[in-house]
Image: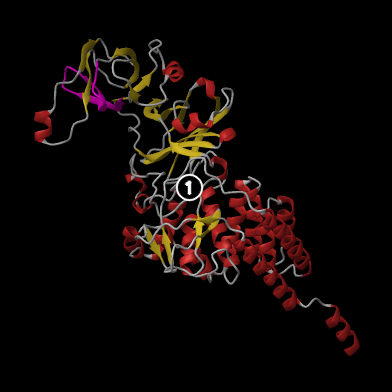
Amino acid sequence: MWVWALILFLAAPDSARLHREARRAQHDFEVLRRHHLPWTHPRGRGPCDERIGRFCLWFGDPRPDWTPPPEPEPVRRARARLVDRLERIAAQLPGDLWVRGQLVRYALEGGDLARAVHAARGCRAEDAWCDLLRAWVAYARGDGAAADSLGAAAEAALPPQERLRWRDLEPLLPDAEVGAYRRLPFAARTVVTEVFWQLADPLVLVPGNDRRVAHRLRWLMDRLASGSEIPEDVAWGDDLRRLLLRYGWPVAWARERPDGPSLGLATGIVSIYPPRAWHFSPPLRAALQPSTLAPGDWALADARAVTGHTPPYADRAFVPLAHQLVPFRRGGAPVWVAAVRLTDDTALTRLRPAADAYAAVGLFAGVPGPWRGVRDSVRLDRGRAALVLPAPPVTSVVSVEAWIPSVGWAGRARYAATPPAAGDPSLSGLLLLEPDRPARSLDEALTLARGDTTLASGERVGLYWEVYDIDADSATVALRLEPRAGHGLLARLRRPPPPLELRWTEHPPTPARSLILGLPRLRPGAYRLRLELRTPDGRRWVTEQGVAVR
């Protein structure tokens, strides 16, 4: 028995020695990488835009076409040798998460997806972390739904304290929102966290919550970086963790040329985060009360935002989407009609998509509740698209989306909207149309719907609206275009007369009406189209559509 025990002991791999060998190899690679980093000129010793621990942040204007410089050949060769070495050690230590994780990391960094997939499948460490490695490679190969599912399983399998750290939103919030978040009871935080991540999903059109996947993978990277050699040549700490959770892993590094005695970090390493990153984290107020999320509350392109993320499926441009969203009824139930414009966007024009390229478009409503919606695929040369979605019975967040995969472009409008009450006498909204011809039905109006609410001074524009359950022999209809002035008595006194006003009588009110307006010469600015229907007994209904004149 003693002989057999000795033989088994001698045959077993020396796991501690192999682990040290892997760490030494990783350390040597990062030192070599650091020595080959390109040089950059110092930013100066002026004040930081923001300070996080040991690190000074500057928010520069992104260059639209900037990409990281190509790696020197010695770095590529050294990474290939590191991957070979880690692969050999991982085969002998299938339960060592650090070795397995570094193998996946450097294989992906070097563009070797096949080896990364093989390494993740062979993971025999804790289930949660192995699931995360598999989520990472699923994400790298473009399977967002699998990455989201694996990431959710991993998060659920974490020890309770670790899971609470992952779900803590504080590192992702601006300072002004931290106090309100801390005062929330535990149960309220749980609800707010789920709403926050539902709103943070860049596109509901694309399966999987891309932003939440990225957040989970950032926690995985935190685990792998802790105690490891990193390009910045400092010890991993809370400040680097906060930067990682906010902005992701840097896409490049550079060495700062000394311009005199060093007054900063001894390393002089500049970390460069993705220049095309967008602020998908919603305002905390929207997560607390989604019904308050208004258009304009959430700037995706905020250069000073405290978080940033680049969806791999829309890595070239992510813009506010030109659109219009108008309430109607179908079968007595409220519906949303959305029309989007797929041309005339500056960022899209710069990307030069083919005329026969396809765009995915979608209209979704959720929060409260899961996202529900409709989607379509249209050719870019059509220029616009229209969608119809049954409206939830309560105020909910609506997301109007478009995505052109061939050029990495996406657009989105996301805000709360309140549908009209079903069954009550009312007017629909005002749908703006191209001035080709009047529409005789909503179906026909959808084929003519404009993809935005921006008008040119003096142009012609079509309108379509419907009347529901207004029982009257006659009605007076007034349509006016007026500037969107401020509120209050003084603003009303100063308000100029409307530049356009029409009035007529209908016997009885027409259920569906369309007309074409010729706009007068107007100053650029914000206006509203206001339609009022009044019956002889004094009842009155009003519907409005905001427009911008350029």
Considering the numbered disc 1 on the image, is that residue within a helix, a strand or a loop? Answer: loop
- The amino acid sitting under disc 1 is Ala
x%, y% of residue 117?
72, 54
Q: Which residues are magenta?
A: 521-550
Q: Quadrant of the N terminus?
A: bottom right
- Classify mark 1: residues with Cα within 10 Å, few (<14), some (14-19) or many (20+): many
From the image, give the main secondary structure of the stretch colored magenta: strand
Up the image or down, 508 lies above or below 498; here it is above
The residue at 17%/35% (across/down) is 486
Q: Could you say which quadrant of the image residue 223 lies in?
A: bottom right
Instruction: Tell whether 548 sits left or right of 7.
Output: left
x%, y% of residue 515?
32, 12
**Going by the picture, which residue comes out furthest to the bottom?**
2
Residue 543 among magenta residues: yes
x%, y% of residue 381?
53, 21
Please indicate, yes or no, whether residue 165 appears anywhere in the rendered image.
yes
**Going by the picture, which residue comes out furthest to the front?**
260
Query: Which residue occupies the foreground of this view, 71 or 158?
Result: 71
